[in-house]
């Protein structure tokens, strides 16, 4: 493996993914909540009932800020908060039906923006990119699994 080439390609991909993220953020599609709140709802939708500490770890949002965001979402009737009966130090969060609806709308909006952004690609380039992303996801999943064991 050409280590120097690999590092350079990773750096370039990070920059391109930042560009892609900015393009997707700039698209219309206001759902009445902040991007951070929408991301939390989507995360809960995709991962299901989750502990506060796990949400904080995966979202990299300070717990104090996260508690405020989740409290607001709970007040809006989108999130359900449950203290663990066996260990009161743990708090579980899940989506209400209204929260599921908002999360699904947000994810569908994101999917439509991604499809529109990549629509100009020809079938051959789309197939190549799909294959490359599948491979990248498989390898990154292995790396993540390895690091989670440590």
Image (cartoon, rainbow, N blue to C red):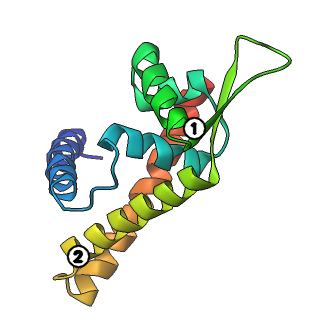
N-terminal-most mark, 2 or 1:
2
Residue 128 marker? none
Which residue of the protein is positioned furthest toward the right in this rendering? 86
Pick whichever, 43 or 120, lies toward us: 43
| Circle 1 crowding by C-alpha within 10 Å: few under 14, some 14–19, many from 20 | few
Residue 145 marker? 1
Q: Is residue 91 left or right of residue 54?
A: right
Could you tell me how far apart the alpha carbons at marks 2 and 1 are, in whole angstroms? 32 Å
Q: Position of residue 132 (x, y in %)?
A: 34, 66
Q: Position of residue 68 (x, y in %)?
A: 44, 22
In this picture, is 42 found above or below 107? above
Pick whichever, 14 or 88, lies toward us: 88
Q: What residue is disc 2 on?
A: 116
The quadrant of the rendering that contains the C terminus is top right
Q: Position of residue 19 (x, y in %)?
A: 13, 51
Residue drawn at the location 20% of the way across and 62% of the way down: 28
Element at label 2: helix
| Circle 2 crowding by C-alpha within 10 Å: few under 14, some 14–19, many from 20 | few
Residue drawn at the location 49% of the way across and 36% of the way down: 73
Q: Is residue 38 left or right of residue 18?
A: right
Q: Position of residue 120 (x, y in %)?
A: 16, 82
Quadrant for residue 4, please give it. top left
Q: Nearer the viewer, mark 2 or mark 1?
A: 2
In this picture, is 110 found above or below 83? below
Pick whichever, 54 or 149, lies toward us: 54
Residue drawn at the location 21% of the way across and 39% of the way down: 7
């Amino acid at each position: 493996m050409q280590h120097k080439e690999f590092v350079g390609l990773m750096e370039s991909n990070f920059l391109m993914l930042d560009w892609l993220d900015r393009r997707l953020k700039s698209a219309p599609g206001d759902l009445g909540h902040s991007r951070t709140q929408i991301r939390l709802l989507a995360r809960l939708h995709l991962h299901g009932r989750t502990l506060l500490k796990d949400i904080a770890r995966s979202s990299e949002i300070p717990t104090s800020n996260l508690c405020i965001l989740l409290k607001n979402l709970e007040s809006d009737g989108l999130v359900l908060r449950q203290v663990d009966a066996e260990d009161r130090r743990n708090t579980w969060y899940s989506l209400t039906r209204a929260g599921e609806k908002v999360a699904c709308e947000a994810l569908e909006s994101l999917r439509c923006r991604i499809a529109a952004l990549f629509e100009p690609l020809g079938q051959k380039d789309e197939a190549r990119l799909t294959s490359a992303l599948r491979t990248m996801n498989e390898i990154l999943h292995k790396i993540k699994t390895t690091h989670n064991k440590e």
